[in-house]
Amino acid sequence: MRHTPSDAWERLRGIQPLSLCDWPGRSTAVLFLSGCNLGCPTCHNADLAWRPESLPTIFAPDALHFIERRRDWLDGIVVSGGEPTIADGLCGFLGDIGRFGLPVKLDTNGMRPDVLADVLDRELVEEIHVDVKGPVDLYPALTGGKADAKIAAENLSQVFDLARERPKSFAFRMTRVPLLSPSDIDAARALLPAGFSLTVNAYVPPRRTHAHADPQTRRMPGNLVHGAHRRRHPESPESQRDQGPDPRPQARP
């Protein structure tokens, strides 16, 4: 039976030490949490989303030490996936990384508006960037059958309500995958609350035979974990220091 992590820290499968494109205008590190509640055929991180056991776990003390060492050179931390909002203990995870004083951005598909409301109420993130897949009637095809049109409409409606309440906390984007026509993109754009724009990313051709390429671009799962962040690598935090006790705060109620 496949193990399902109960703690968001157990889902940490990748660190991008420096990104200049994940939070426009900021130099960030990106933390990738495994697992996803959708099955998009264009997913660019299929292993991370559905086969996380194929990727090494990044241990909490190593990740926290990495952020501590880099915080003076970073403008923020991005938490991406997979889909971070499905992780139990996400609020605790965000609180752990937020204690270094860096702003945090959360990437999401918007299908867990209750979680988004919670992290905003707790002031755990500065921005939430939502991937709008397309018009709601195409969500079954765009998500591999994991979200029907009614569910997509209900969830997005709640997300849009949150965005109206906190307009500085939200941004919306989509990928021009082959299934989408120009009129579909216009229909998706029309869903957004007044005053919001939709950033449309170009479709990237497939780099694997078993998956269509990626929406957002940039990296395949095998590139998520860099050598110096693997346990037992000679330049890893583990090799340079005594691990000592787990530095994470006690779990929050």
Image (spheres, rainbow, N blue to C red):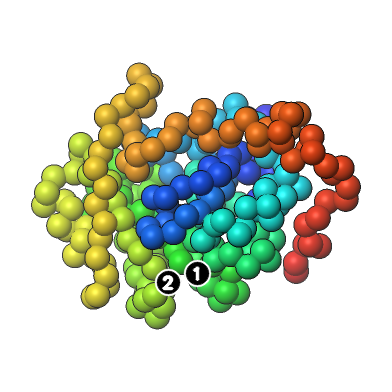
Camera-side residue of 67 and 156: 67
Please name the residue shown 79% across and 62% down the image: 249
How far is disc 1 from disc 2 in space, using C-alphas? 6 Å
Furthest-left residue in this view: 183
State whether residue 110 appears in this view: no
| 224 up-or-down from 73: above or below | above
How many numbered badges does the structure rendering display? 2
Please name the residue shown 21% across and 61% down the image: 189
Furthest-front residue in this view: 73
Mark number displayed over residue 169: 2
Mark number displayed over residue 59: none
The percent coordinates of residue 115 (x first, y second) are 54, 64
| Residue 215 quadrant | top left
- Label pair 1/2, CB-CB below 8 angstroms: yes
Q: Earlier in the sequence, mark 1 or mark 2?
A: 1
Residue type at mark 2 is Ser
The percent coordinates of residue 131 (x first, y second) are 36, 54
Reading the image, the residue beneath label 1 is 126
Residue type at mark 1 is Glu
Camera-side residue of 24 and 39: 24
State whether residue 117 appears in this view: yes
Camera-side residue of 5 and 230: 230
Image quadrant containing the N terminus: top right
The percent coordinates of residue 99 (x first, y second) are 68, 66
Q: Is residue 148 left or right of residue 224?
A: left
| Residue 97 quadrant | bottom right
Q: Is residue 191 left or right of residue 68?
A: left
Label 1 element class: loop
